[in-house]
Structure formats: structure tokens, C-alpha cells
Amino acid sequence: MLESYREEIIPEKWYNIIPDLPEPLPPPLDRSKGRSSIDLLNDIVPKEILKQEFSFSRYVDIPDEVREQYIQIGRPTPLVRARNLEKRLDYRGKIFFKFEGATVTGSHKINTAIPQAYYAAQEGSSGTVTETGAGQWGTATALASSLYSLPCTVFMVRISYQQKPGRKVIMNTYGADVIPSPSDMTGSGLKFFKENTNHPGSLGIAISEAVEYAMKKNLKYMIGSVLNSAITHQSIIGLETIKQLELEGEKADSLIGCVGGGSNFSGFVFPFLNDHEDMDIIASTAEEVPKFTRGEYKYDYIDSAGILPQLRMFSLGADFVPPKIYSGGLRYHGASPSLSLLVRNGRIKAEDVSQNEVIDALKIFAGTQGIIAAPESGHAIASALRYIKANKNEKKTVVVNVSGHGLLDLGIFEGKRE
Amino acid sequence: MKDLYLYFTMGYPDMDTLERFISLINADKVNGIEIGFPSMDPKYDGPEIRKSHSSAVDPGRERMLEFLKILGMKNIPLYSLQYYSDICSDIEENLAILRESGFSGIIVPDLTTDYFKDSEKVIDHIEESGLDFIPFFSASSPDRVIARQCSLTSSWIYYGIQPSTGINMPMDMAPGVQRIRSIAGNRKMIFGFGIRNEDHVREAVRNGADGIAIGTILLKYLESNDKNGFIDLVERMRVALNDNS
Ligand SMILES: Cc1ncc(COP(=O)(O)O)c(C=O)c1O
């Protein structure tokens, strides 16, 4: 019975929004003088992932083997009616949260790590490499690689490496090597490492390092966010949520999530967009990394060194080094092109939340629902609290994506500021 | 019979060489010629065609018009490939030159993505000027954009297989093509971007191409002034196109 319930909720296909966008998605741009930076992906990304990236099918079959692994790592994740929070806020509408923190690695990141590692293994690659900010993506990559017996290397943004030693231990336990970035192991890292051996790093720099390392060592580079294939895999969040709401006989009026590169948010929201034209949709970003409110909508590099192609997106500049906030996963200069397009055209509203407001929201959520949410997810919760306050009398059904747990991010509550 | 379209960059490698190669083209074998006018920023082209833009020789107005006149006498439909970012400031003059030189239509690769809000107005304007606006679609074109542009135009459709010219990423052609077909009906679809050999041609035809456009692979023959190689290539492409038809 348990299995059949799961089978019913976990979709058989991922959803890709591109054919349903209101405007065409600007293609990736190659600015290189020599070899095309798009062509370069052929060496470091599994063929099947590239196929998904460039074929733009509206629906993509989830391999049976991947569906089985989804069950193994805790999918479907719960959709919980937050009755305690409703009561605390004296809210007469309904609040639901989708809890991606319930996966074994603690966030949504495993949703795309599994298929990427699966295809990498199928194609006989010799190992994986990636970057990680908060440590959630590195953890997911480390586990997914272990599931398919692939050696794994993770470049971890140094500030997170120092703030979250537990993440390193977990990745090591899953069998991965963890290197603080910027490091002296790649050209793109060395540039910053020489300047300052204690450079806090950024996701942009760590991506450059991982890509460079993948090329040098002939490894597969795992795409954590931003690119469309990762976002398509994350659609499992929204597809499950739709099904779970349906089973509850509920209909969402508002969707709220947080944005780093855009994968958990887009995965959560995009499957709803076609059939729910009148929903309020809010993307919550860090005030310290205000890509949507202060960034420019333009072609910019994915990584700091400009090894990968440019994407048309909201960006604070590929060389932007964000302040050292606890939400490591939000310390990225850009956001995925499809999400950027929908924010720009007004379908999705964006707002910034400060770290202090996040801490308050995390405490309220913990004190009512018992969950210590990830600092990144704290932005979504804070935006939800704002939204509920502003719509107190409207009895809306608000659904929040809580992208991860924060059990390894407790420093944020001790008021430690580096 | 399937169509074969050839792409050249104006002034590359130089006007005399280009003219010599154009004179080799036989109207029995080639159904259309596309002329790319060098752009300040040919952003949706790959490294090789970008290089042809930056090193093309500027012929000057007189020489260009003379060249276009020669082209016009070949009795092969002509299409310009121009970036909207280059022509928007002087679109009237541009359309007038094309029309007077006997061009049939215009392909504007950046219009729909970079100037979406203006795109329908521009398409109307081009169509009213007596030139065909050739819709440029790819697997990423949304349904509603395909539907709108098909309703505003009546020509063939340019289908970009790859995200830019000159590269080859793994992909399933079928879903994108089938989706466009389901909206565009039986409009002629010419596939371009990334066709480098006979296998690519056959794959395009298998996936429903009514013809193909090639550009990047022609460059090396022009660069080395290899006329026989060029004639042979056109012949081989022609054969591959007919293979499945
Ligand atoms: C828990 C959590 N939420 C959100 C994010 C932000 O990434 P994305 O916007 O791709 O979901 C991260 C990234 O590390 C994360 O770990």
C-alpha cells in the first residue's frame, strides 16, 4: 500500500516549461574566440543530459531506475498543512509546505543529482566533479555518485567550508573528496588563491574550478542549478505537489519559494503555470544578493572565469562576490534564463529578504512546525509570512516550498557574523 | 525534391573570391542563397561564421550593389540574413536595397528573442514592404510564438537545429520538429545550423526537413579557393538530400 501511494504521487515524466513560455528563450551564447564554449559541454556533461538540455521536449521520461532511486531517497516528499503556523499567525486561510528537506541528503538537490549520476554511469564515465555553496548540492552529488560507484570531487566555496564542517564530513562519508575553493588546483582558482589564501570564494568561482577540473581529469561535471536540464529534473517537486493538493481536494492560490540559481523554485512553480493563470507567485531572494531587484537582465557568464557559455538572465555580474551570508545557496550572481524571463515579464514577482528577517522566520517556523529549515528556505518562509500578513483577510491557500533542512546550518542562530 | 540553400557572408573572404564561387552555383542544384551581411555582433553564430563576419572585406556601397545585381541575375531566390541590432536604425533603406536587388525575403535571427515586444510590428512592416519575413524557429520556440508568427507570414520556415551555427550538440530532433509541424501545418521547413556532413543531411530529412541550409562547412573552400572541392561538396549534399526523398 505504501509503495502504491508513492507510485501514484511520483510522476512518470519530468516537465520542461520552455515550449510553454510566453516568449522565446534566448539561446546560450558563445563568446569564445577559439573552441565554442557550448561545444565544450560535450566533453564534460553526459550526452543524455545535453540531449535534454537542447531538445526542449515538453515531457521527458523519468527512467524506471531513477524513479526507484527517488523512492529510496525519500520521495515523494511530504506536503504538510501547517496548522500550527496558521494558528500562531491567526490566519484564516491555509498554509501548506512542501518539505524537500525530507530527502536523505536534506534538500531538493538530490532530485537532479540522481539522474545526472545515472546517465554519467551509463555512459561509462570515470567520475564526477562539481561545486557547492551551502554544501547541499555537494552532498547530493556525493551520494548520487556513490549510488553509481563513481568517484566524486567537490569544490566547496571556502566560506561555507569554514562555516559548515559537518557538510564536509558527510560528503567524505559518502566517499567524495572536498576541496575548499578558490584552490590552487585550477587556473581559475589559483588567480584568487594567490591574492588571498583565505578568499571566501563564490559559486561563480567554484563552478569555474569544477569545470576546469572536469576538462583536465576527463570527469563529468554535475550541473547544480541554472541550466534547464537541472530545472526540468526539479519539476518533480511541483508535479508531486499538484498531485498531493489534488488528493487533498485543495487548490493553491499562491506559491512561494527561494531562489539561488533558480532550480528549486522553478521546479516547484513551473508545473503549475499553465493551468493556474491567476496565481500569485513570489520568488524570494537574499537582500545581500539582489539579482532580480538590482541586477540587470542581460547576457552574462554562468561562471566567474567565463569558461561556460553566457546566458540571458538577471545578473549582478559574473565577478560579483556576494557578502558572507549564511544562505550559501543563494550566493550566486544570476538565475536561470527561464525564471529570469518570467520575472522580467511580470508573471513571477520577486522580493528580497534580509538575513535578520530570515532568522526570525526560521524561528517562527521551528517553534510551530518543529522544522529547522535551511537558511535558503528561510527566505521562502519569510516571504510567506509577509504575504500572509498582507493578505490576512483573504483566506488564500498559500503553498511554500521548503527546499531543505538546516540542521547543519545552526551557526545562523548563534548570531555569528564573519 | 528537397531544397538546398547555401549561406555566404558578404565580403568574405573577399569580394572577388565570393563572386567567383557564386558563379559556380547552378540553379538546378541550389534552391536558395542566403547572404549574411557582416554584423557588429553576430551573436547567434558559432566561432567560424563569427570570424567570417569580423574579417569580411567591406566592399563599399557601389561594389556591394554591383555584387547584388550579379546575384539577382542568377535566378535563384535570395535571402538576406541580418541581425535586427544592425538594421533597426535604417530599416527602410535596408529593405529598399534588398527589394531592388531582387531579394525574396529576410531572415532576422535575433528579432524574436531579443526584440520580442517589437517583433510583430517589424514582421508586419517587412511583409508590407514586399519581402517575405522568414520565421526562424528552433526546438525552444514556444507554441504561442510559433502560432503567431505563422499567422503573420506565409513563406517557408527556417528551423535552427543547433543553438548556434557550426556546433553539434546531442539532441533529439523529433520532438521540436513535430511540435512545430503540429502548429505550422505543411509549411516548408528548411533546417540549418550545424549541418556538416551527409549523415547530418540524412538525419534532417528523416526528421521531416523539406530542405537544408549549409554555411559553416562552405567557409573552408572559400578560404582555400578550392572550387572543385566546393562543387563536389554541393554535389554530395544534393545526393544525400535525394537519398531519402
Ligand atoms: C536548501 C537550498 N535551497 C535553495 C538553494 C538555492 O538553489 P536553487 O535556487 O537552485 O534551488 C540551495 C542551493 O544550494 C539550497 O541548498
Image: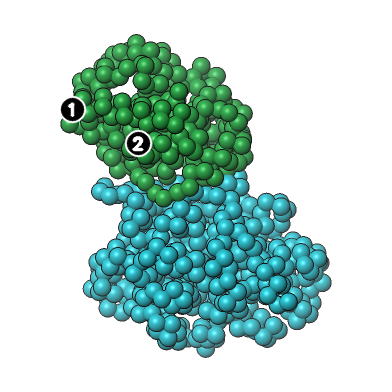
Q: Which residue is mark 1?
A: B225
Question: Mark 1: which amino acid?
Answer: Asn
Crowding near the residue tagged with mark 1, few <14, some 14–19, many ≥20 C-alpha atoms within 10 Å:
some
Name the residue that disc number 2 marks.
B198
Is residue A335 at least partly visible in the picture? no
User: Up-down: is B80 above or below A173?
Assistant: above
Pointer 1 indicates a residue of which chain?
B
Q: Earlier in the sequence, mark 2 or mark 1?
A: 2
Q: Position of residue A182 (x, y in %)?
A: 31, 73
Could you tell me which secondary element the residue under label 2 belongs to? helix
| Horizontal side of residue B74 vs A349, given as left or right | left
**Quick check: marks 2 and 1 in contact, CB under 8 Å?**
no
Q: How many numbered dots are placed on residues in this image? A: 2
The furthest residue to the bottom: A414
The reply to whether residue B186 is visible in this rendering is yes
Which residue is at 58% across, 28% downward? B186
Foreground residue, A237 or A93?
A: A237
| B217 in relation to A239, above or below | above
